[in-house]
Amino acid sequence: MLISQFLDEGDTIRVVARDGGKARVVNGARSVYSLATEAARTGSGLEALIERKGFADVVDLEALYRKGRLLSPINHPDPAHLHLTGTGLTHLGSAAARDAMHKKLNAEGEEQLTDSMKMFRMGLDGGKPGAGQAGVQPEWFYKGNGTMAVAPGTALLSPAFAEDAGEEPEVAGIYIIGDDGMPFRVGFALSNEFSDHVTERVNYLYLAHSKLRNASFGPEILIGDLPVDIRGASRILRDGKPLWEKPFLSGETNMSHTIANLEHHHFKYALFRRPGDVHVHMFGTATLSFADGIRTRDGDVFEIEAPEFGLPLRNPLEIEQPVNVTVKAL
């Protein structure tokens, strides 16, 4: 089942569900957040709760998308309580581009093993432990709170000071934290983990700076288990025409870590188990247009799709105007 949410003509949030057929409004659901919270509190499965509530009008999701009425498929009433985070070097092809970005030469001119390659190898050796066991921890980063989440169809804003504005097509896990502090997985969604790869390339310690950017996810959340072999596409459109396109692979068949291991190493921190919070945790990618020498510009459109996730995720790129920030003493 796929779920999403939109604003109706009265600017009221409506939740939509579809399961291989028409998209229908879910009766009595004020938002995906409230629906997921109810499922967690009652101990019922989310899909079972939706079926019990029943359905109302059929809606045209693609038409709503074109009109700009689709929202991020989950949000929090207080954006400060939605966390955008991610992991890197988790996919079998992910080391090549990162390694090339971070290669160093020693005094004799020989290549040293980069930190990226070391971490990738750690994942290969220990990222898929047995059931109930914790494996090696992945690279982890913070992108921001709900104020940095951009709805499908809305522009990803690149700061004026950024050196690059590049897409990262990923699968994200969507979670809420229950009243007892335990995480519940709502499902999975496509995401664009928008980053500044030129800044990261200057020095690996600039990774944190490169990640403090907008991100987008959705338009729909897939309820249930993540397919083990996801095959989609990532592309960039310029002036309405394809500029670049490559296959986008994900799922555990194409990963060096299990989803359970990535979840464990995120939620082991008490900070990320605060009741009521929402987490959008992105699992990494092996596909980057930057690795192929692409430099994006204002007006380009990123598009990420995979059949299992319903509608594609589309976002135009917009370069922000410079902001003069002055710190004043009180």
Image (cartoon, rainbow, N blue to C red):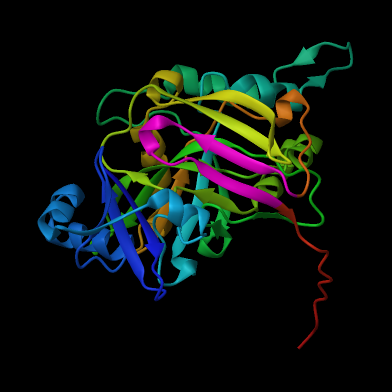
Q: Quadrant of residue 300?
A: top right
Tell me: 104 left or right of 187. Answer: right
Towards the viewer: 4 or 87: 4
Q: Measured along the vertical axis of the image, is residue 140 above or below residue 55?
A: above
Residue 109 shows in this picture: yes
Q: Quadrant of residue 290?
A: top right
Residue 275 makes an appearance in the image: no
Q: Residue at x 58, y 43 (%)?
A: 193
How far across and down, in percent of the image, does residue 148 sit?
58, 60
For the point 79% across and 36% down, the residue is 295
Magenta extent: 299-317
The picture places residue 258, in percent across and down from the top left corner, at 37, 28
**Residue at coordinates 43% horizontally, 22% vertically from top-left?**
126
Establish if 158 lies above or below 124: below
- Between 6 and 174, the one lying in front of the other is 6
**243 or 138, nearer to the observer:** 243
Q: Quadrant of the C terminus?
A: bottom right
Along the line of sight, which residue is nearer the eye, 179 or 147?
A: 147
Establish if 301 lies above or below 71: above
Residue placed at 73% from the left, 24% from the top?
292
